[in-house]
Image (tube, rainbow, N blue to C red):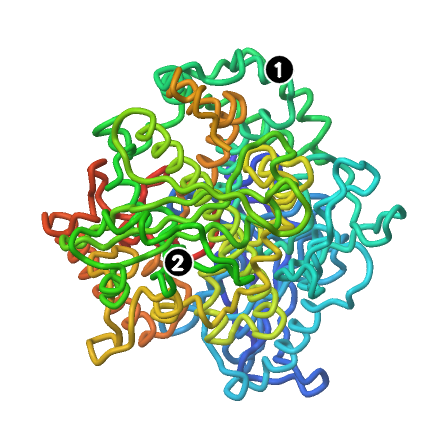
Amino acid sequence: MPFCPKLWDRSPVPPANAIAVNGTVVVANTFGLSAPGKSTTLRLFSGTQIDHETGKGKLSPEAPLRGGKKSKHGKTSTTTYHVTFVVDADFGTPGAVSVRNGNRADRFFLRHVRLELAEDRSIHFECNSWVYPYKKTAADRLFFVNTSYLPSKTPEALVLLRDEELRSLRGDGKGERKDWERIYDYDRYNDLGNPDNPEHVRPVVGGTRTHPYPRRCRTGRAISNTDGVTETRKHVINLDFYIPPDERVSPGKLEEVLKLGVQAVTHFVIPEARTLVHGNDFKSMEQLRKDLYSRPVQPAVDGEVMERLKSSVPSHKTYKQVAKAVKEEHPAKFPIPQVIQQDPEAWRSDEEFAREMLAGLNPVAIKRLQTFPPVSSGGKRSSITAEHIKSQLGDVTIEMAMHQKRLYILDHHDYLMPYLRRINTLGVCIYASRTLLFLKADGTLKPVVIELSLPSDGEGDTELSRVFLPATHGTEGHLWQLAKAHVSVNDSGYHQLISHWLFTHAAVEPFIIATRRQLSAMHPIHKLLEPHFKDTMQINTLARSILLNAGGILERTMYPGKYAVEMSSAIYGDWRFTEQSLPNDLLKRGMASSSNEPGGLTLHIEDYPYAVDGLERTQLEADPEKFFLEMVPDRFTATLGLALIEVLSNHTSDEVYLGQRATSTWTDDGQLLRLLDRFREDLRRVERRVEERNKDPRLKNRRGPAKVPYTLLFPDVAGQEKGLTGKGIPNSVSI
């Protein structure tokens, strides 16, 4: 019997005075979702010929998908369909394609559409977006050709389509957003608290002088009747917060993020998971290393964990994705930090302590000391005196050191002090800190004094301060180590909450919203910015759902606790966008001065990798290590905190670094592609210079006692490696 293809697999035969335009449609295979099928149809809009009745480009008849062959695009499993459009001979060149998902229930992830034209020409539509059923959207999904146009240069046939698309993205600011809607609107952070639970009452941040904050994407959920300002949430953990479909992570990345995050989430959801780590405080440094970096995580509670998680995740499809991820992989242990791989004790040295202020995770907080003694924003003088530090400066006087720009400060005092009374009622022991450092002749910094301060017991703004000096032996040596630990806690908290979350994640979201609302996908600036926005809103949404919310993971693992977001709001009040770039940031912090040197400035610390590329004395004396460990989080909190940091530090397999693009078909502009190639060559030269500097024994800040080469700003143009790589500059803020 001869083979008879399905009717819907056959290519239509064009009538007279018509031509056939053949194309391929590539869809990602998504776990738990059905394929588009023959009910999905496409139509073409001409980019050169206008329908004078509509004022838009001529519109082709509907064309259904045909076939469906399994394929691969990179590491992504896909299905490639065929489509044939029958258009008039004078249809012109296609400029846009509309897609109607006729499926009754499921969405699909459309990667791209490619058309083959006469004379071996082709047209590409880069999509990378979810297409929802027409039954829900009541509108076709529109994608423009990958050619860039300024508004004044946009073909007349596409102008109305462009304007209609932008208006639809802005919405009307009313009602609760549904997951299939593509609406970009602004709102305040009014969904972190729960006024119906006294323990979870949190201020709304954003929109007021009292609590300024960047805007987030509006979701429009119901407002609580209790306070009239807080948005309600149905679940403690809500992985299905609204986000416009174009901002959702790809199916492959979503699965990877779920694999990374499920351990942290289950620690949070299941109080019984505390039994995974028996006891409270660590008993020794050796136990800390074994618990966190050697012992496999026990999977015995997985069944109970998943049952509890199932009741917290509203979408059954999301739960199935989590369950699949958990079954496939159990993380054995946390990776050993680089700083203790070569020498487990190197982190204790003053040299490494100071080096990490220049080449560690938070090299943007240190400043040049402008006034001695330091003075707070309220005019209060520090308790640090000349007698404390003069012996640490050799034959250099304080006046000379200031004049020679050799005194620096890591200041975690002013922003913390107003919150310390409240923070320390939460069962933690936090001090406001000032650390002064001296630039030595070999280009390295050495800490010369640490001041730890608390508000006084009485009313008013008086302070209790204590000064600690460098020491290596006896009680004074242990006190010095403890003082450095308090400084490191402050710096780590500032990095995660302020430098990382507030100044990168949160600050970028309003720019994403504004770009989508105001710039067409055809606009060259939109194409320039788009890779820098990849996945940011999705990660920010997850942060609001499970990290920043009242009682969330961040409040449980970071010392500000329930005051974290409120404190970050106070810091945001002094933040200015124009001061964040290089060299403006360096000039503001006094780390450089304007000059006639190449680049227009002179660094005061030449080997600065980021810029170039009450204490209980008697207990301490009895058992210094035990006392130290009592000051760090208990075993459960430490485990949870590390799980969070691991999730936030991993690169996924679809990470796109500076100099890379997700596909080679993002534009058809040959000049742009050539410019990108030149930019990649520049980045490769930067890579070679970074490697050379890391090998230079004179540049001691690049490795230090821990022997960790500085790679945080290594471009890694050819990078494909996922996980904790410690290198590569991602295009976007996406974990």
Look at the image and tell me whether residue 70 can be seen.
no
- As displayed, is residue 412 above or below residue 145? above
**552 sits left or right of 651 in the view:** right
Would you call the spot at circle 2 few (<14 residues within 10 Å), some (14-19), or many (20 or more)? some
- As displayed, is residue 668 above or below residue 608? below
Residue at 21% over, 64% down: 681
- As displayed, is residue 584 above or below residue 188? below
User: Which residue lies most toward the right here?
Assistant: 225
- As displayed, is residue 150 above or below residue 492? below
Q: Which residue is mark 1?
A: 303
Residue at 22% over, 28% down: 343
Q: From the top left corner, tell me how far across and down residue 272 is, in percent.
A: 63, 16
Q: From the top left corner, tell me how far across and down residue 408 is, in percent.
A: 32, 57
Check disc 1 and report its element: helix, strand or loop.
helix
Q: From the top left corner, tell me how far across and down residue 159 is, in percent.
A: 61, 82
Amino acid at the residue labelled 2: Pro
Amino acid at the residue labelled 1: Gly
227, 332: nearer the viewer: 227
482, 291: nearer the viewer: 482
Look at the image and tell me whether residue 608 can be seen.
yes
Q: Earlier in the sequence, mark 1 or mark 2?
A: 1
User: Which residue lies most toward the left here?
Assistant: 697
436, 23: nearer the viewer: 436
Q: Which residue is mark 2?
A: 373
